[in-house]
Image: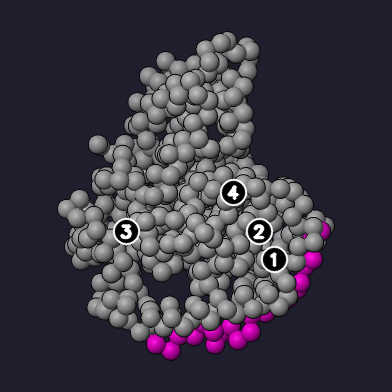
Amino acid sequence: MPVHSVHSTSRRSNMGRRLGAACAIAAIAVTVHPAGTRAQAGASFEVVEATIATVHGAFTSGRLTCRQLVQAYLDRIEAYDKTDPAINSLIVTNPRALGIADSLDRRFAREGLTGPLHCVPTIVKDNFETNDLQTTAGSAALAGWIPRRDATMVARMKAAGAIVLAKSNLAEWAFTPYETVSSILPGYTRNPYDLSRVTAGSSGGTAAAVAASLGLVGLGSDTGNSIRGPSAHQALFGIRSTMGLTSRAGVVPLNNRADIAGPMARTADDAVRVFQVVAGEDPDDSVTAGANAKRERDYTSFLTSGALQGARIGVLRQAYERATTDTEVVRVFDRALAELRAAGATIIDTVIVDSLGALTRNPNGGCNPFKYDLERYFAARGEGAPVKTIAEVLSRPGNYHPTVQSRLEAAQRVTTTPEETPGCTYREEVVKPRFRAAITALMDSLRLDALVHPTWSNPPRLIGDLNTPHGDNSQLFSPTSGFPAITVPMGYTRGNTLPAGMTFLGRAWSEGRLISLAYDYERASHHRRPPAITPPLSARP
């Protein structure tokens, strides 16, 4: 199957637009009920900031069809992603999206909603395998590769009724948390709240597209930051689960000992609806063994108000206080703490993980497992793999963006497997267990429901600026402990324009409690708002 660009897909969809129901630019006018009866004249549905619940309600009431929803997002992609304002968040759109939508409309006419994610147009980070769209991990070395099967999360999303609408740009090989740039897509992905700013990385394409309502929800991956940082920079909700609760099978690895995959969405409700579908054991990812015995039966049951009343929340200043921390971010965070108190939470300020430096010190040196994790991944794909080794990637300069050359060369120089590398084994066998124990002991001693801190200590940088402080606070506590973390919008800096996020960190397997706290905070604060530069299409000048 050929690779389709955003523009070529949009041109192909013109026929679909002519054959579909009449479409206003701002709102999709729906004239036929799924059951075939006439809808009330003038009924309409706006996709900007739409949620799964509002979309499903519109389907059920006959105000919207799946085809019209998908077409609305394709129209927004055509208008905003590669032409002014040119967010540049997507690598490919799905040429079959409208056909899949038609099939879902036919099924809906017979049986109603086909699953919990019925016709949910999803933006998928391009390091997730998709069996009908190319998967590149941002690298030109993988251009055109269509895997034989879907990543487990993608397969579960599809089984629940979702449509993979587009594959999103990422920091190449998911290497950097700071910016979203790759060799597979020219140019940077830009922050829709300020086009001169970065999206963070590496799931910046997913974050920018979801924030700008180019899709309904998204999937990202997070080794040290890459769901939570882009979500914070784009006023989204992002969930990094307990290690072992969600599958990474079919996701191009960066570090199998820390990689997590999960949802990114504009509301807590949407993120949790996706999380409910994707969480759980997977025989293709051994780290998930036993997860079904530990997961909640229904994570959506935690989407209830009042959870903050009586909750005990500790302020983890160790995560964000440093000489370069931005004072505006601190002020926004202080207001968020006041909002938590007003909603009934008890704030314990400050809590301290004792001897943090000693706990995380590794006397046995570094650990760089990327080469072996990646080459094992491609070996498992057999003859279908586009490359087999880092050496192959490095063999042609056009295979990689210049910014990742040194990382690739450093990986190529590694000559011992992670299992044989003292720095890797000490981290897994000593550092992580004692770190988990220390956090658990701290939370137990103070009877805490969660720890909180700003997801980043500084606003999004200007594109191209790698000198000013970045402010990434996500690399240590959740990845090293393997404990869950959820980032939520907490406000804005720089004249109320640049989003900032707050992280809720919990004990292992405490996603249910964190979800309830994040949802209640969302209801109490209402900080999420859409970017001004991607309004409803009818509002464009």
| Viewport quadrant of the N terminus | top left
Give the amino acid at mark 1: Asp
Q: Nearer the viewer, mark 3 or mark 1?
A: 1
Secondary structure under tag 1 reads: loop
Indicate yes or no whether the magenta region holds residue 360. Answer: yes
Tell me residue 454's x, y (percent).
Answer: 64, 64
Nearest to N terminus: mark 2 or mark 1: 1
Q: CA distance from mark 2 to mark 1?
A: 7 Å
Where residue 25 sits: x, y (%)?
A: 54, 24
Residue wearing tag 1: 449
Query: Which sits earlier in the primary sequence, circle 4 or circle 3?
Result: 4
Location of mark 2 (residue)? 513
Q: Alpha-carbon neighbours of circle 2 within 10 Å: few (<14), some, or many (≥20)? A: some
Compute the Cα span from label 2 to label 3: 41 Å
Residue tagged by mark 3?
401
Q: Is residue 261 magenta?
A: no
Are the residues flagged by discs 2 and 1 in contact, CB closer than 8 Å?
yes
Q: Nearer the viewer, mark 2 or mark 3?
A: 2
Q: Distance from label 4 to label 3 (Cα)?
A: 42 Å
Q: Which residues are magenta?
A: 344-365
Local SS, label 4: loop
